[in-house]
Image: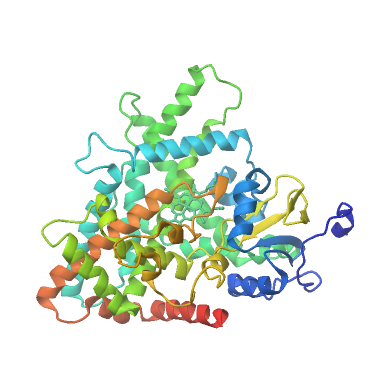
Amino acid sequence: TRRQHTPKGLRRPPGPRGLPLLGSALELRKDPHLVLTQMSRKYGDVMEVTIGSRPVVVLSGLETIKQALVRQAEDFMGRPKLPSFKYISNGHSLAFSYECGEMWKARRKLAQNALKTFSIAASPTASSSCLLEEHVTNEASYLVTKFLQLMEEKQSFDPNSYLIVSVANVICAICFGKRYDHDDQELLSVVNMNTEFGDVVAAGNPTDFIPLLRYLPNRAMAAFKDVNARFNAFIQKIVQNHYTTFDKEHIRDVTDSLIGHCQEKKTGEDVRVQPSDESIISIVNDLFGAGFDTVTTTLSWCIMYAALYPHIQKKIQAELDQTIGCERRPRLSDRGILPYTEAFILEVFRHSSLLPFTIPHSTTKDTVLNGYYIPKDTCVFVNQWQVNHDEKIWKDPSSFKPERFLNAAGTEINKTEGDKVVIFGLGKRRCIGESIGRWEVFLFLSTILQQLERLCARNMATDWLGSIVSINCGESLGVYQGRVSAVDQVSQ
Ligand code: HEM
């Protein structure tokens, strides 16, 4: 029936017909990014699939995605009203809530400023160039000591469970001025719920798209509610604590800076569009939530690729040896002189496409894209994986080759190539933690590889990284390898 409302002379995007009630939901159950990439070959860069009862427009192709998210940014900047989203940050989420008008813009600005002040801005107090560098250096050093101790005591351990606490500690320091021990049960119960969160937020979660399912008992959704409630309670407690110790002359972290903003606002003159205190404070929920899972996942992928391709790992280590040596630790300012390491990280982002889709978008008004009509409030998926594996822009996209991002001499990153990797979204909804994320991954990875190689070489002649990963993460290595080979299948 929706097709009948299409204005004269315009067409709706093409797409598969799908089953009644389910649409294409069954096909999309597993690896939706791969299925939708295949479909896009047949239907094009702008296609419409029905998931459950909901029409979803799926965007592929770098130029089409830029057209929508950058050139027609206002039209495509909304978020859909998906049932699961209302549990996130008590319905006030900056990233997931439907509201995207002036109020949202004001909050996004606040978030960006507060985040910057306590992470990448030059710091007068820190002994490092910025607070982010200080926090990551501390956590990475701890991690190295911990890894060494574990290798000595147990020979085998799962690096991921330590990475996640270290990375969470960095965002905790920025947001809450707080650090947790690696065996802190409260923190562990909050950071270890990724899969419960990820499964529901993943593109095309059936309950969000098939209304009938909402009335049936649903274990995944119940777990999701529970996870969000626990998460919100954890943060609420920290925020309460900040309120009682708040001193406007001494702003300690992002939470203080948001509290300060709420108080200033009350005495200030500008009353036009003021977000509520609750919606300002809840910004830390988004920052903390978005700030550790993505970076931890990226680092895990980095370790997996380094273990899968020992010759590449050796090249990174050789670069570290030649430029930094072993007398000092890597710093953020070394990024320019470690082009191979940078290229490796870019290739990890591209090849893994660890976030195959952005968060779903939605149209804010009736619009036309590449000649196709898309009505207001249509849910839009942006297939980042497709861009990162498009044969039209990448040579041999299924092979893992950091060199593709380097100039012929291997001395510099080719920026034009690097910019073609889409992993942080684009346009008005682009990730606000992009610099933090990229810098953090660089500093953790280079510090771990430099220090561990140096220290392990003393005791073990073996490929330490390969052995940790294969002994301890046999299962996850299988999963990663599975994804890597799934990539190959689609590319053929
Ligand atoms: C949104 C990726 C790290 C905060 C996003 C989006 C992606 C993304 C794909 C959705 C863009 C869209 O919907 O079009 C990543 C990756 C990261 C990372 C790959 C690390 C490697 C971070 C960090 C923070 C953060 C460290 C905070 C400290 C956010 C926020 C949003 C967001 C608040 C929502 C923006 C909005 O809806 O306006 N990120 N992110 N991210 N990210 Fe990140």
Q: Is residue 180 left or right of residue 221?
A: left
User: How many numbered circles are shown?
Assistant: 0
- Residue 200, by quadrant, is bottom right
- Residue 334, by quadrant, is bottom left
* Type of colouring: rainbow
Q: Residue 453: x and y, percent?
A: 18, 70
Q: Is residue 113 left or right of residue 324?
A: right
Q: Residue 446: x and y, percent?
A: 26, 61
Q: Is residue 435 above or below residue 392?
A: above
Task: Using the image as rendered, state which of residue 431 and residue 272 is in the foreground.
Answer: 431
Q: Residue visible at 35% across and 29% down? A: 246
Is any atom of residue 186 visible in this view? Answer: no
Q: Residue visible at 75% across and 64% down? A: 212
Q: Is residue 113 left or right of residue 380?
A: left
Q: Residue 58: x and y, percent?
A: 67, 62
Q: Residue visible at 76% across and 54% down? A: 374
The quarter in which the N terminus is drawn is bottom right
Task: Using the image as rendered, state which of residue 490 and residue 249 is in the foreground.
Answer: 490
- Name of the residue lying farthest toward the front: 408
Is any atom of residue 207 visible in this view? Answer: yes
The quarter in which the C terminus is drawn is bottom right
Task: Using the image as rendered, state which of residue 167 and residue 3 is in the foreground.
Answer: 3
- Residue 441, by quadrant, is bottom left
Q: Residue 470: x and y, percent?
A: 31, 81
Q: Residue visible at 43% across and 76% down? A: 480
Task: Using the image as rendered, state which of residue 400 and residue 168 is in the foreground.
Answer: 400
